[in-house]
């Protein structure tokens, strides 16, 4: 592991202990490790995940993997949403693209949105890719390590873990619970997790192989049109496996979770006798949960992902919210540990909790209770819920955002991608220039007179000059920059615009306020 800043471990304390090595914990650990923050990541499982679980990565999450330098592996090992097929026995009734079923055209890549749609990849492979990248940073997941309890003290947190029957204390500045819906960290801190578990829905979910079935289609059988007896098989790219989902009677005892049960369900609901299921890799029963913690932070303890919110079965929300939580928190933790203003950490819950609340359908009521108008509150909730790709989620209302006038891209928005041509005629993607742990200043100059206008050099800041040339017309249009007035945008390490102004001093003020 790289040497951390000296201020990162006062009193010989570890800087960060991450509990849970799912996607959220791995992304957070990777964000810290690539910024030279000392950490440990522990996981109660004895080894890596073998389950497909969250198998859809949304476009905004793909952009995070781009920033982490992992997008090529994600794209190589995944695939597009397969066409949806409906069967009656072995007879094909119809075949439709998923986009037709959703009532929208198939999204196509554009310069500002290079990853246009949900990307299918089993969670076990997503975790493999993240874990390998983390190991390259010198950090290994400590499997078979159970978190027991923790308490805060004057300097941070004292946590107790157990490995091979031996309990040990870990002194850390920050503890992060990324340990799922049954989070031991959340329970240790006594943080309430209100909500409900469905009594009307119950599913068996499993990863299996199925001989003689084509892997390029999401196949469904609905006997007699009864959705309660539906059975679906979704192919998992480049694996030979399908994810099987079968709703079960919610008020009856579950049969044994085993291959024989899966085969019996398949035979009964498909009325086929020519398909043999095999190689059960993972099997669970599942009731949808809708829950949101009362707070995502308690002093030096933070909750990310399912430890903080549990979304019901919806199109690829839970895993993506979790990764985006970790991505939001990672750079802020690293900055504060390295000396930035501790108030920076207040923005984590302020920015992430409303998005989770909107997905769960409880944001509007919360805003109304705080004095917002009902129409405005409902509209904000609808906007977030409808954006299943997460590209239009924003932090405009965050205290970390310097308000700016209305524009196509304003402070608090995601920074779009685009092509940039420099004075020498070299072309680069903006995402290539944003990639990495730094803050970026986009200097949309209006002419030679303001070409040199830039912030005084500071560590961790990159300045990108975008000339008013014909070659840069498209990206200037994307960002709503026109005319003779220069535009300066400060892009945070997580790809969101912190400041938009025609005065460079506004950007300097933000940097001094946040980083000192």
Image: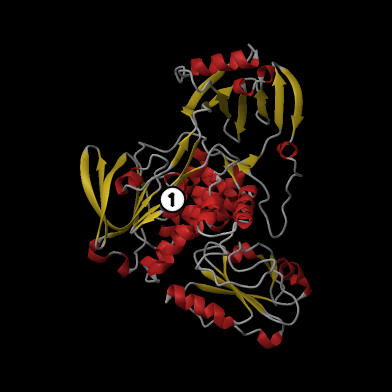
Mark count: 1
Instruction: Let me know if residue 461 appears in the view.
Output: yes
Q: Which residue is mark 1?
A: 304
Quarter of the figure with the N terminus: bottom left
* Of residues 77 and 469, the one drawn nearer to the viewer in this rendering: 469
Quarter of the figure with the C terminus: bottom left
Q: Residue at x 30, y 41 (%)?
A: 146
> Residue 234 in the image: x percent, y percent?
61, 30
Q: Quadrant of residue 213?
A: top right
* Of residues 26 and 196, the one drawn nearer to the viewer in this rendering: 196
Picture layout, residue 340 above or below residue 187: below
Q: Is residue 489 left or right of residue 125?
A: right
> Residue 15 in the image: x percent, y percent?
32, 60
As drawn, which residue projects farthest toward the right?
470
Instruction: Let me know if residue 69 appears in the view.
Output: no
Q: Could you tell me which secondary element the residue under label 1 belongs to?
A: loop
* Of residues 401 and 209, the one drawn nearer to the viewer in this rendering: 401
Q: Quadrant of residue 343?
A: bottom left
Q: Residue at x 62, y 64 (%)?
A: 415
């Amino acid at each position: 592991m790289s040497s951390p800043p000296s201020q990162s471990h006062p009193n010989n304390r570890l800087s960060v202990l991450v509990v849970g090595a799912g996607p959220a914990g791995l992304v957070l650990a990777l964000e810290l490790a690539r910024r030279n923050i000392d950490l440990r990541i522990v996981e109660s499982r004895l080894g890596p995940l073998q389950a497909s679980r969250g198998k859809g990565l949304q476009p905004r999450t793909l952009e995070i993997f781009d920033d982490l330098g992992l997008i090529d592996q994600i794209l190589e090992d995944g695939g597009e949403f397969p066409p949806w097929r409906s069967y009656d026995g072995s007879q094909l009734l119809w075949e439709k693209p998923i986009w037709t079923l959703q009532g929208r055209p198939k999204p196509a890549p554009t310069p500002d949105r290079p990853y246009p749609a949900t990307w299918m990849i089993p969670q076990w492979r997503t975790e493999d890719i993240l874990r390998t990248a983390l190991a390259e940073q010198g950090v290994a997941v400590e499997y078979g390590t159970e978190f027991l309890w923790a308490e805060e003290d004057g300097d941070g947190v004292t946590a107790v873990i157990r490995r091979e029957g031996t309990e040990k204390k870990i002194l850390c500045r920050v503890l992060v619970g990324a340990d799922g819906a049954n989070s031991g960290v959340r329970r240790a801190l006594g943080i309430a997790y209100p909500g409900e578990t469905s009594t009307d829905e119950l599913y068996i979910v499993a990863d299996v192989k199925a001989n003689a079935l084509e892997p390029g289609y999401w196949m469904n059988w609905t006997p007699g049109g009864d959705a309660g007896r539906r059975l679906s098989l979704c192919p998992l790219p480049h694996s030979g496996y399908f994810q099987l989902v079968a709703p079960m009677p919610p008020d009856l005892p579950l049969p044994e979770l085993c291959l024989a049960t899966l085969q019996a369900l398949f035979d009964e609901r498909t009325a086929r006798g020519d398909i043999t299921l095999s190689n059960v890799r993972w099997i669970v029963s599942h009731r949808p949960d809708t829950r949101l913690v009362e707070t995502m932070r308690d002093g030096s303890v933070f909750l990310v992902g399912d430890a903080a919110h549990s979304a019901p079965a919806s199109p690829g929300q839970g895993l993506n919210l979790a990764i985006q939580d970790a991505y939001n928190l990672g750079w802020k933790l690293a900055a504060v540990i390295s000396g930035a203003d501790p108030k920076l950490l207040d923005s984590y819950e302020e920015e992430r909790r409303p998005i989770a609340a909107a997905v769960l359908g409880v944001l509007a009521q919360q805003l109304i209770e705080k004095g917002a108008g009902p129409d405005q509150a409902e509209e904000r909730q609808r906007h977030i819920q409808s954006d299943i790709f997460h590209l239009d989620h924003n932090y405009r209302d965050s205290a970390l955002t310097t308000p700016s006038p209305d524009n196509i891209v304003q402070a608090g928005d995601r920074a779009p991608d685009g092509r940039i041509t420099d004075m020498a005629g070299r072309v680069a993607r903006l995402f290539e220039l944003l990639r990495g742990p730094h803050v970026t200043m986009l200097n949309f100059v209006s002419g030679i007179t303001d070409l040199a206008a830039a912030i005084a050099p500071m560590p961790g800041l990159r300045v990108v000059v975008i000339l008013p040339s014909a070659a840069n017309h498209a990206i200037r249009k994307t960002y709503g920059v026109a005319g003779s007035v220069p535009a300066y945008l400060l892009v945070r390490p997580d790809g969101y615009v912190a400041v938009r102004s025609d005065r460079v001093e506004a950007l300097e003020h933000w940097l001094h306020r946040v980083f000192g």
